Image (cartoon, rainbow, N blue to C red):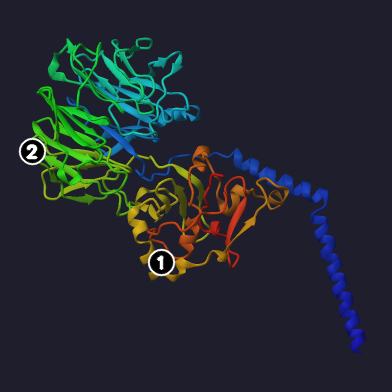
Amino acid sequence: MLEQAWGRNKARRLLAAGIALLLLLSAFSPAARAASDATAEAAYAQEETGTYSWGGVPIGGGGYVTGIVVHPTEPDLVYIRTDVGGIYRWNETTASWKQLVGWADRSQINLYGGESIAIDPTDPDVVYAALGKYDYLRPSDIYKSTDRGETWTATGLNANGAQVRMAANGGNRTAGERLAVDPNDGSVVFFGSRYDGLFRSGEGAAPGSWTRVAGLPVAGSSPHGVTFVLFDPSSGSPGEGSAVIYAGVHNSGVYRSSDYGDTWTLLTGSPAQPLRAAVDPNGKLYVAHGAGLAAYESGAWSDRTPAADTGKTFGSIAIDPANPDRLIAARKLDSHGNPIYRSEDGGATWETVPYERDIRVPWMPDWHWSSATSALAFDPFRPGRVWLTDWYYPWRTEDIDATPTVWRNDAKGLETVVNVANLVSPPGGGTILHSGIADNGGVRSPIAGRSAGFHLLYGNGRHPRADDDRHRRAAARPELRRPRRDVRLERRRPRGSRFGRLFGRRRHELYGVRLAALQGSARRQSRGVGDLARRHRMGAADGRYPLYGRPRRDLAEGGRRAVRTADGQPYFRQLLSASVGR
């Protein structure tokens, strides 16, 4: 009896196995595969031809603002430049910034580097911009606008038959301004280049009007070259031009011309690495340089460096238009918390500016303040208002004399971060968008993209404050010390494979996300973003942990690898993975 029952059960099992095998084989038959492929391709084609309404996902700030220019005769007309994110104009009514290079397409991506900005003091509608992100890419040129940056015209700056090289994301990117307009004659424009010397136009930078100024020695100054050009308004009169012009040359010093730029003389004793300069209404020159602050008056130089930072780099100096003895300056180290100084006696004595922050960017970590401070400027129409720019934002205080001063970082419209990885909207857990960005780690937000919803997920190891806390945090949270063997890599099939099409999706559609407009060059810039997933799974939701180690390989390109935990769950099911240069 038992043998008969066993035989019947065995027969049933064999029959079921045979049917399952036939079904499986039929699923993988050429006809079935073709039908599945056709269905998948039709669905994909329908998606590709669908109507999408594309728009930016606002993050707000996060990139290096390398310079600021405030118009001296038009209230609230302020321009800023960034190293890779374009140039912007301030809107006082909406407390927002407007991108002025948004017209540049992919073939003109190099124009998103703002090498320098200059306004025409005699005409508030005219603004010039030197645009060129990298010295090995093109195009690069001086652009002119006669409607405050709404439209632009290339002026055709060339040297030896080639476009003049610029490097807004290169060394000494905060020096300036390299581009200057004579305040006594708006038709005269000068530009100091990194490799090709000094250029001049006497026709408002009209195409074909640029000529090279042979009298300024620039040998040995590349790749920083001419760091600033500055007119002395007191040396001329309206319509007649300014006779005295200063130019800073890297590894050489400060040069002076007394004949409208025709000939130049090195000022003996000038700082060898000048970065920025300002001249007061009486013709007294101040220079921020690689070893402090200096002043030039009556043919002599004097040191004006605050005693607490003797010998350190200062990158900015500004003079109050209402009081030539009132100065502000900032140390410029590649770190956070550079002190801001103010002086009431022309730099003879200084005091540190106490501060508080009125933070307008919700994802901003604590260490973002006066980071690699690049520029300072007084507002000539609002006494007490001072602007400051740094690694991440433009800051502004309404009362530089207050104790403490209160600085706000309005970043609406200012989108300067570099996306270095895929965008992922994980299943479940709410409509959250995760993104990896250079220099700031990763952020998460409601998919609607409201800036108020962004939160920093983790640091990228560059921030001293986060690194200082590494061991303390690890001790407090043992899971941060999870051994490396708990993570393994697993190769996935490449995009568009037959396996992927069989299931009606491609690799970049996994978990409901399509990737759009990724910056290919940026994919190769970042290391460490892949650890974002590990931080999140370990509960590091506040994002204050530096990275531990490096991700193994690029998930989004090339290697087609997926990182999994010991329990087999893919990290990128919850979060994005990095695109790591090989």
x then y, percent, for residue 443: 42, 52
| Residue drawn at 14 percent across, 16 percent down | 235
Which residue is the site of mark 1?
474
| Picture residue at 30% right of the left edge, 14% below the top | 200
Counting residues from the start of the chain, the first of labels 2 and 1 encountered is 2
Residue 34 is situated, as x and y percent measured from the top left of the image, at 78, 46
Q: Is residue 546 visible?
A: yes
Image vertical order of residue 402 relative to residue 132, above or below? below
Give the camera-side residue of 264 and 198: 264
Q: Disc 2 designates what residue?
A: 344
Asked if residue 152 lies left or right of residue 497, the reply is left
Please say if 151 is above or below 294: above
Q: State the residue at coordinates (29%, 39%).
A: 96
> In the rendering, at what x and y percent does residue 421 appear?
50, 47
Q: Dot 1 lies on which element?
A: helix
**Residue at image coords 36%, 44%:** 62
